Image (cartoon, helix red, strand yellow):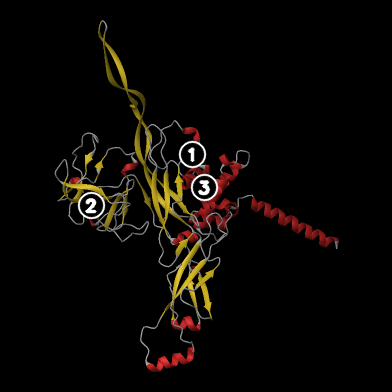
Amino acid sequence: SGQQSVTGVESADDANSYWQIRGKPARPCQRGSAIKCGQAIRITHMKTGRNLHTHHFSSPLSNNQEVSAFGESGEGDDLDVWTVQCEGVYWERDDPVRFKHVGTEVFLSVTGEQYGHPIRGQREVHGMSSPNQHTWWRTMEGVFIQPSQEPLRHDEL
Amino acid sequence: MAKKAMNICNVCCLLLYITTAVLASRDFYKILGVSKTASIRDIKKAYRKLALQLHPDRNPDDPKAQDKFADLGAAYEVLSDEEKRKQYDTYGEDGLKEGHHSSHNDIFSSFFGDFGFMFGGNRQQQDRNIPRGNDIVLDLEVTLEEVYSGNFVEVVRNKPVAKEAPGKRKCNCRQEMKTTQLGPGRFQMTQEMVCDECPNVKLVNEERTLEVEIEQGVRDEMEYPFIGEGEPHIDGEPGDLRFRIKVLKHPVFERRGDDLYTNVTISLVEALVGFEMDIVHLDGHKVHIVRDKITKPGARMWKKGEGLPNFDNINIRGSLIITFDVEFPQTQLDDQQKDGIQSILKQESVQKVYNGLQGY
């Protein structure tokens, strides 16, 4: 589609692989608050400020649905929203989760197709209509912000 | 008379002996410079400030620097832990259970990162040739309440760390030209990949908790670096993790530098006859406002010292500037009310026509 590509890479030491979990457009979530299973989120690429996005375009290698990175400084459009699916009440860090797109209903997945030059070896990330073993994701390296206490107020002493 | 003097002398000596005996165990509150009722946040703040000042690398000429620094670490370790603090308050340092010595390095690095020697905010310039992993810059949203009172944010950093592994690996790979002789006078030049052999390294994920301080008066875009907490580099040092402060908008107060601006809508009656009210500030304390004169729409009240603390000197505060606007009655007045108002106010008809847009 001409938008920024999103690919899977094997190296674990690339700062270009960090994504930030944020709230829906116009509904910011509070720093440190836990994300509920089923909650709608945006996944923003930290280096470029673009949101994980999908739409009715075919992906180049596998003919699934194309997943791209879209927007400026964290603001794109309504096709940037995904719901996180997991067991239990909250998204626990070690849980395998699925990401289902709000709008086109596809699941974020990687099935292994590799690009050639100039991004040789990088895997295609796309959307698939049904959940399967390729649609599970898990958080790995990252910076996880804990909930804070409110700054103390004088009238509580 | 002499007997009395001697008794007093004895008592003094006894007191002196007792106080010195007690002082043999360390006063952790004094070391951190906090009161006995200090909150955990005050303790973290005090530790962070003193750790930068007392680090032995910063005081190479002080022979006692190591001891002072060690005392600081011990004080923080005890007072930052609820259990240990209770024990210490009741029984003193000797009453603490054994086996409580977590490394001071761990405490220091949770505030400053893995290398910690970031004086002046810059890495030492000796490592120009060592390759460095990527830096990670993360926006940290803070509320105006946090800018006013300060706060600590705990962050768990899960990162890949280079560890030794068995065997060797290829490193410093580069293309080199190789010449082979095919026959007398005939040579062929080919490009070949040549690598060195290095000890094998694998990346293992590790976790640690970091303490990010939101200092009072912090400004937008200010950064708090944690050395070595960025991305690893297989052949070199890890990069840094930097938190960039982003101050969120507030529904009541607007920040301009160290000053705070707010608006209050009062009724027409209050504007004419006066009023009394409280504005709840960012930390909950109330700012009391009294007016007994007429308040015009757009009137501003300046409250010195009720703004934000200045980042460089938190004893200086900006001002709170309150702008008033007036809400007129919603219902129309009947003739009787109109007459009543005209007779009470006794204001002459004005009806001045002028260009209001020039210079505004």
Q: Which mark is residue B123?
A: 1
Q: Which residue is under mark 2?
A: A99
Is B36 situated above or below B51? below
3 and 2 marks in contact (CB < 8 Å): no
Chain identifier of the residue bearing label 1 in the image: B
3 or 2: mark nearer the eye: 2
* Picture mark count: 3
Residue placed under numbered mark 3 in the picture: B98
Left or right of B28 in this view: B337: left
Label 2 is placed on what type of residue? Phe
Q: In front here: B114 or A19?
A: A19
Q: Residue at x 33, y 25 (%)?
A: B174
| Distance of label 3 from label 2 (alpha carbons) | 49 Å
Q: Are marks 1 and 3 on the same chain?
A: yes
Residue kind at label 3, given as amino acid type: Glu
Eyeballing the image, is B25 above or below B344?
above
Work out which residue is located at the far top of the displayed protein and give it. Answer: B184
Question: Vertically, is B167 above or below B356?
Answer: above
Give the alpha-carbon distance from disc 2 to disc 1, as whole Å. Answer: 40 Å
